[in-house]
Image (cartoon, grey):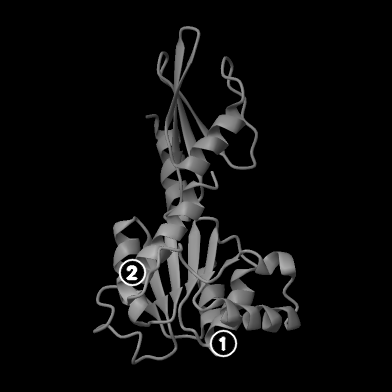
Amino acid sequence: MKKNILDQVVIAKRKNDPIVLITKITTEEQWIYKANEGLNIRGLENVEELSEAALRTDRCARIQVNEDIFFIQPFNPTLRMIIIGAVHVAQFLVQFASLSGFAVTVVDPRGAFASEVRFPGVAKLTSWPDDALRELKPDFRTAVVMLSHDPKLDDPALVTTLNSEAFYVGALGSKKTHHSRCERLLAEGVTSEEISRIHAPIGLDIGARSPSEIAVSIIGEVVESLRRSK
């Protein structure tokens, strides 16, 4: 890899910018594709389409055009999960999300809940969730999970999150609880279209009962939203 190409990859990783490295294996030529920037490569049609597909799926691709072989390699920002509410379910969800490749942050202004004893080695913020989310800036590689079951914490966090690019937004609670939540959000000026992004009741319908089972259902739905929407 040439130094100018390597420098671009390093800078993109540092800035958490999505890029695609395209290598023409037969000649060892290389190009960098950046989202929203045009790129033309002689002999390879649909460069942008192929690059965007690689970013969406997190998958490399090998394309042969006549005698030439191109290798397409995506470099995506780190997957993140922001958990609002340092509750019992969150203790299990942190483990499952970390094993699934997510960098996890737990947010709860109640310091006794978001403690090192309960969440050892996990990034924690004890600011109010909406303030924390403005600091964390959820992007298209971020899942935000509301588990506090407290409108004072969840509602402001939802308003902030629904104005972000987060690929997944979920909130704990029954259908009745979610109906009341929707009425409050509408009163705050959130649109019905924005509210429709919320996964609630949260998690896949697997009949989960215990905190660990609920956590399994949540990580399953998060991964499904990440992969099946591609």
Q: Distance between the residues labelled 2 and 1?
A: 24 Å
31 to the left or right of 35: left
Identify the residue at the far top of this view.
67
Q: Name the residue under label 1.
A: 151
Q: How crowded is mark 1: few (under 14 residues within 10 Å), some or many (20 or more)?
A: some
Q: Which residue is drawn at 41% across and 58% down?
A: 220
The spot of residue 60 in percent (x, y) is: 42, 33
User: Which label is found at residue 170?
Assistant: none
Q: Nearer the viewer, residue 170 or 99?
A: 170
151 to the left or right of 209: right
In terms of image quadrants, where is residue 83? Answer: bottom left
Tag 1 secondary structure: helix
Name the quarter where the N terminus is drawn: top left
Q: Which residue is drawn at 56% across and 89% down?
A: 152
Task: Report the amino acid beneath label 1.
Answer: Pro
Tag 2 secondary structure: helix
Q: Which of 22 and 45 is in front in this view?
A: 45
Q: Residue at x 55, y 58 (%)?
A: 167
Q: Earlier in the sequence, mark 2 or mark 1?
A: 1
Q: Which of 68 and 196 is in front in this view?
A: 196
Q: Name the residue under label 2.
A: 213
56 w.r.t. 96: above or below: above
Asked whether the viewer can see residue 21, the reply is yes
Task: Report the amino acid beneath label 2.
Answer: Glu
30 w.r.t. 93: above or below: above
